[in-house]
């Protein structure tokens, strides 16, 4: 009898261990599957991270290109304004200035057209839609970007309102 009791004792723990081992094996298999899924997700995140990093590098490069282009445009516009101011300072009388204005109005129109093209190209159709919608609504308030023609016209209005005495005084100061 002792031998049977010993066998039973050995079999019972063995069956319990077998069940425990099967459960642990199943859990290990589940964890392996979960681990594989997580590895795939990590790989996807790494690919997305690389795409984001590449996009940031591209954006920084484009930013530098835009800033360089903007600096060149700014420098060219400043040079054009400097030459314009030099020309304006060279006129000695109101009549001379008005004659020069009449002569250079065509170039101002070209500059205005060029600026409008720049606005259209840089800001796209949205700027044109914005301006046409303002016209449609009858909004005659100051446009957020002033054209050269508007500046020159306002300056000419000031010039024509000068008296001869004020003009002589200004010419003497030059």
Image: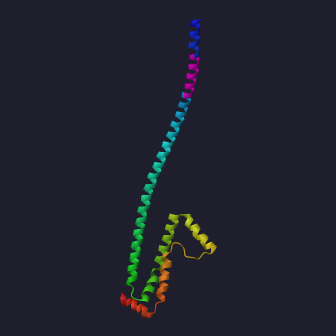
Q: Position of residue 20 (x, y in %)?
A: 57, 22
Tell me: residue 44, above or below residue 57.
above
> Furthest residue to the bottom?
165
Please tell me how many numbered marks the rendered image carries.
0
Q: Residue at x 58, y 9 (%)?
A: 5
Render colour scheme: rainbow
Q: Which residues are magenta?
A: 13-27
Seen in the picture, residue 79 relative to 50 is either above or below; the reply is below
Is residue 46 found left or right of 20 in the rendered image? left
Q: Quadrant of residue 30?
A: top right
Comparing 167 with 39, the one in front is: 39
Residue name at image x 40 percent, y 82 percent? 88
Which residue shows up at 41% across the image and 65% down it?
A: 71
Q: Main secondary structure of the magenta part?
A: helix
**Relative image position of residue 13 (x, y in whole percent):** 57, 17
Residue 141, by quadrant, is: bottom right
Q: Is residue 165 above or below residue 149?
A: below
**x 47%, y 51%: residue:** 55
Residue 19 on image: x %, y %: 59, 21
> Quick one: quadrant of the N terminus?
top right
Vertical placement of residue 124 versus 156, above or below: above
* 15 in the magenta segment: yes
Q: Residue furthest front?
A: 2
Reply yes or no: does residue 116 show up in magenta: no
Name the residue furthest top. Answer: 1
User: Looking at this view, is 138 or 120 the one in front?
Assistant: 138
List x then y, in percent, for residue 124: 54, 63
| Image position of 168 (left or right of 2) | left
The C terminus - image quarter: bottom left
Residue toward you, 128 or 9: 9
């Amino acid at each position: 009898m002792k031998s049977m009791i010993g066998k039973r004792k050995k079999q019972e723990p063995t069956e319990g261990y077998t069940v425990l081992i099967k459960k642990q094996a199943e859990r290990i298999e589940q964890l392996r599957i979960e681990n594989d899924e997580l590895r795939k997700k990590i790989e996807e995140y790494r690919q997305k991270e690389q795409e984001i990093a590449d996009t940031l590098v591209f954006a920084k490069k484009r930013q530098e290109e835009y800033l360089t282009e903007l600096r060149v445009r700014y420098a060219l516009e400043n040079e054009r304004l400097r030459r314009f101011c030099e020309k304006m300072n060279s006129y000695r009388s109101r009549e001379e200035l008005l004659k020069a204005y009449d002569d250079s109005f065509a170039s101002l129109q070209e500059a205005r057209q060029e600026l409008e093209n720049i606005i259209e190209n840089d800001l796209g159709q949205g700027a044109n839609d914005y301006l046409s919608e303002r016209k449609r609504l009858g909004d005659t308030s100051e446009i957020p970007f002033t054209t050269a023609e508007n500046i020159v016209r306002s300056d000419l209005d000031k010039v024509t309102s000068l008296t001869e005495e004020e003009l002589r005084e200004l010419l003497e100061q030059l």
